[in-house]
Image: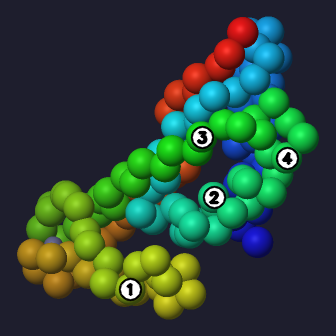
């Protein structure tokens, strides 16, 4: 399960950060999840909730901010956001990425990542 390993690595990263800053607990974790990151935010929340039990993150709030997917078309140089019809199920049925301008094949250039934007710690 992709979300489980992602939640795990998020928690590890935050725990390391908390240790470095001698924080007793984590109040808030702000996450950015790209539309193309192939992560279900509900599953991610669920896994997070399971994994934080008994850790300094147990009472933390997980905020998830979506990042628009961006594509680039080689044929007409279009670059911009693209909306996927099937979301959030697109990690099962991956859509054909088509240029909204010329219908050509596009390349994903943004919204593929999942990263921690900020954390709030309690000393
Ligand atoms: Zn195009």
Name the residue tied to disc 4: 53
Mark 1 crowd level (few <14, some 14–19, many ≥20, 10 Å Cα): few
First in sequence: mark 2 or mark 3? 2
Within 8 Å: ligand 1 and the Cβ of disc 3? Answer: no
- Residue drawn where x is 34% and y is 61% of the image: 69
Eye-nearest disc, 2 or 3: 3
Q: Are marks 4 and 2 in contact (CB under 8 Å)?
A: no
Q: Is residue 16 above or below residue 22?
A: below
Q: CA distance from mark 1 to mark 4?
A: 33 Å
- Residue drawn where x is 70% and y is 43% of the image: 10
**Position in image of residue 59 (x %, y %):** 71, 37
Eye-nearest disc, 1 or 2: 2
| 66 and 73: which is toward the camera | 66
Q: Is residue 94 above or below residue 99?
A: below
Secondary structure beneath dot 3 equals strand
| 20 and 120: which is toward the camera | 120
Name the residue tied to disc 2: 45
First in sequence: mark 4 or mark 2? 2
**Position in image of residue 123 (x %, y %):** 72, 9
Mark 4 crowd level (few <14, some 14–19, many ≥20, 10 Å Cα): few
Mark 3 crowd level (few <14, some 14–19, many ≥20, 10 Å Cα): some
**Position in image of residue 30 (x %, y %):** 52, 37
Name the residue tied to disc 1: 86
First in sequence: mark 1 or mark 3? 3
Q: Are marks 2 and 3 in contact (CB under 8 Å)?
A: no
Eye-nearest disc, 1 or 4: 4
Q: CA distance from mark 1 to mark 3?
A: 28 Å
Q: CA distance from mark 2 to mark 3?
A: 10 Å
Q: Are marks 1 and 4 in contact (CB under 8 Å)?
A: no
Q: CA distance from mark 4 to mark 2?
A: 13 Å
Name the residue tied to disc 3: 61
């Amino acid at each position: 399960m992709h979300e489980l390993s992602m939640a795990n690595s998020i928690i590890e990263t935050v725990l390391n950060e908390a240790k470095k800053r001698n924080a007793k607990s984590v109040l808030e974790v702000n996450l950015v999840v790209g539309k193309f990151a192939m992560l279900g935010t509900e599953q991610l929340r669920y896994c997070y909730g399971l994994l934080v039990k008994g850790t300094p993150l147990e009472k933390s709030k997980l905020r998830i901010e979506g990042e628009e997917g961006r594509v680039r078309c080689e044929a007409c140089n279009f670059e911009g956001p693209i909306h996927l019809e099937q979301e959030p199920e697109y990690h099962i049925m991956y859509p054909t990425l088509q240029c909204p301008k010329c219908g050509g094949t596009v390349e994903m250039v943004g919204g593929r990542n999942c990263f921690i934007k900020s954390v709030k710690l309690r000393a």
